[in-house]
């Protein structure tokens, strides 16, 4: 237990901002010291209580400033008090009680996060396998394996869902809901892209937004949902939906924004442009993780007849 944590608790208690759990900790802390068990009126005196708290903390920080005998007694009591606080805090943590306005057990959800160049394979409690692409977040609620198996996705993931007819599996991707019983499919829902894309590898997938049921997709079908207009486009899957899990990204009529997202995923580099031709072009190419960023940039610039330069802060400008 750090002194800074103790001070924060005391400060919140003084200002009447402590949660019931925090008040319980501080009041048990006060009870652990023998100020005068027959005279506790000093606790209602703000100045006296504040002075006592300061002296207790100061003694914990500077035990050499008091006599050896008193120091030993004080340290035993302080250790017992701090141990008690730790025990109470740990117990409340295990129970999920709120401290400092946050559910310390798991803050309601468990977040699985990837950064640039990272991918993770995750096995969910129901044995569903999830391949999480770079720069993504998968959130699982505490009651994930309840009547419904709900997850939230920001980024991209390939799901191989364990079939359970009584418990539908639902992905919330920026408000678009993908519902299945057991199948495999890919969802792309990056914040910087203006669309959400769902592709089905096996089985049947239902797609809806808050206003309507949009479509049922079968194996080999692809749906693109425009976030702003809510317009929907349907197509056939071209190539391998999960190619990115194998280290290569197949771009088919991709926008510059999607190309830029791929570069951020693979190389951790921001690809940008001020050239309307570059921004308005569509891109048909494969970006491989085993190629250097220089090789990838030279390939792109050859395709569109442009050049590139470094812009600082991990930024590449195509012009």
Image (cartoon, rainbow, N blue to C red):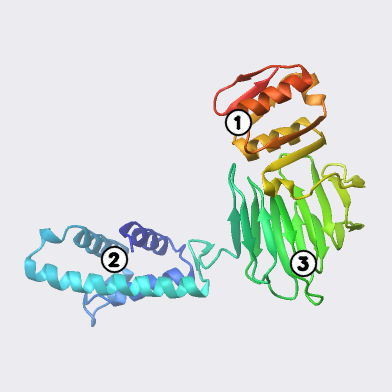
Residue 142 located left or right of residue 208? left
Q: Callout 3: 10 Å neighbours few (<14), some, many (20+)?
A: many
Residue under pointer 1: 292
Instruction: Please report whichever mark, 1 or 3, sits nearer to the chain's N-terminal start.
Output: 3
Front in this rendered view, residue 319 or 219 = 219
Q: Callout 2: 10 Å neighbours few (<14), some, many (20+)?
A: some
Residue under pointer 2: 49
Residue 68 located left or right of residue 297? left
Query: Is residue 318 positioned above or below 50 on the image?
Result: above
Q: Position of residue 129 (x, y in %)?
A: 68, 63
Instruction: Please report whichever mark, 2 or 3, sits nearer to the chain's N-terminal start.
Output: 2
Mark number, residue 201: none
Residue 200 located left or right of residue 192? right
Residue under pointer 3: 169
The residue positioned 22% from the left and 77% from the top of the image is 34
Q: Position of residue 68 (x, y in %)?
A: 7, 67
Residue 100 located left or right of residue 261? left
The residue positioned 33% from the left and 70% from the top of the image is 44
Q: Position of residue 60 (x, y in %)?
A: 22, 62
Query: Is residue 100 positioned above or below 144 on the image?
Result: above
């Amino acid at each position: 237990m750090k002194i800074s944590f103790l001070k924060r608790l005391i400060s919140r208690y003084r200002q009447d901002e402590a949660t019931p759990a925090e008040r319980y900790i501080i009041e048990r802390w006060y009870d652990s010291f023998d100020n005068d068990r027959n005279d506790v009126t000093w606790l209602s005196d703000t100045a006296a209580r504040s002075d006592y708290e300061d002296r207790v903390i100061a003694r914990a920080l500077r035990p050499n400033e008091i006599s050896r005998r008193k120091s030993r007694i004080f340290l035993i009591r302080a250790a017992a008090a701090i141990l008690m606080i730790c025990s109470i805090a740990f117990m409340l943590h295990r129970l999920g009680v709120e401290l400092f306005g946050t559910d310390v057990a798991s803050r309601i959800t468990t977040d699985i996060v990837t950064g640039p160049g990272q991918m993770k394979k995750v096995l969910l409690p129901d044995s569903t396998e999830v391949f999480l692409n770079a720069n993504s977040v998968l959130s699982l609620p505490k009651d994930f394996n309840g009547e419904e198996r709900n997850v939230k996705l920001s980024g991209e993931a390939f799901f191989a869902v364990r079939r359970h007819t009584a418990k539908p599996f639902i992905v919330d991707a920026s408000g678009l809901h993908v519902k299945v019983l057991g199948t495999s499919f890919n969802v792309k829902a990056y914040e910087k892209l203006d669309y959400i894309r769902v592709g089905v590898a096996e089985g049947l997938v239902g797609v809806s937004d808050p206003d309507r049921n949009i479509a049922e997709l079968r194996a080999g079908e692809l749906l693109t949902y425009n976030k702003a207009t809510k317009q929907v486009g349907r197509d056939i899957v071209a190539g391998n939906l999960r190619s990115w899990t194998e280290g290569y990204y197949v771009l088919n009529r991709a926008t510059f924004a999607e190309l830029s997202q791929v570069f951020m995923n693979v190389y951790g580099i921001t690809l940008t442009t001020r050239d309307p031709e570059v921004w308005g072009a569509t891109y048909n190419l494969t970006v491989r993780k085993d190629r250097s960023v220089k090789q990838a940039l030279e390939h792109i610039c050859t395709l569109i007849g442009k050049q590139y330069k470094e812009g600082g802060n991990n930024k590449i400008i195509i012009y």
